[in-house]
Image (cartoon, grey):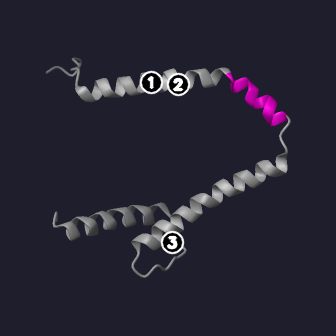
């Protein structure tokens, strides 16, 4: 098969439908995008900062909970938030889960 030829697979049809549904539901939201700046102009900025801080704290809280749930000792180290930690944690958790179910 030539690389320039494309085949229609169920996966590609699914992705196309997913994109079309996303465009159908999200495109009308862009119409009210200009209203966002009007709202931001009249916003109470101390509350905006509180909301941003709360949003950032949920990321770190989620990292701590995931670490405690996957680590038998439950200790949190300063390296736990680094991307390399997450790669190791996910890979090791997957191996342990598979070996406990008899897949490995």
53 shown above or below 20: below
Find disc 1 in the rendering and name its residue.
21
Residue 97 seen anywhere in this rendered image of the structure: yes
Residue 91 appears left or right of 31 = left
71 shown above or below 104: below
Find disc 2 in the rendering and name its residue.
25
Label 1, label 2: how many angstroms apart (C-alpha)? 6 Å
Q: Are marks 1 and 2 in contact (CB under 8 Å)?
A: yes
Label 2, label 3: how many angstroms apart (C-alpha)? 40 Å
What residue appears at the point 23 percent right and 64 percent down from the top-left corner? 98
How many discs appear?
Answer: 3
Q: What stretch of residues is rendered in magenta?
A: 32-41
Find disc 3 in the rendering and name its residue.
79
* Quadrant in the rendering for residue 32: top right
Whichever of labels 2 and 3 marks the residue nearer the N terminus, that label is 2
Of 53 and 80, the residue lying toward us: 53
47 shown above or below 58: above
Q: List x then y, in percent, for residue 71.
A: 41, 75
């Amino acid at each position: 098969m030539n690389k320039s030829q494309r085949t229609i697979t169920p996966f590609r049809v699914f992705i196309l439908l997913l994109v079309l549904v996303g465009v159908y539901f999200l495109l009308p939201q862009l119409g009210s995008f200009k209203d966002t700046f009007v709202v931001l102009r009249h916003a109470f900025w101390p509350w905006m900062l509180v909301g941003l801080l709360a949003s950032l704290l949920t990321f770190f809280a989620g990292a701590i909970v995931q670490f405690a749930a996957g680590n038998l000792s439950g200790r949190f180290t300063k390296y736990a938030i680094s991307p390399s930690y997450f790669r190791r944690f996910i890979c090791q958790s997957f191996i342990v889960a598979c070996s406990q179910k008899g897949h490995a």
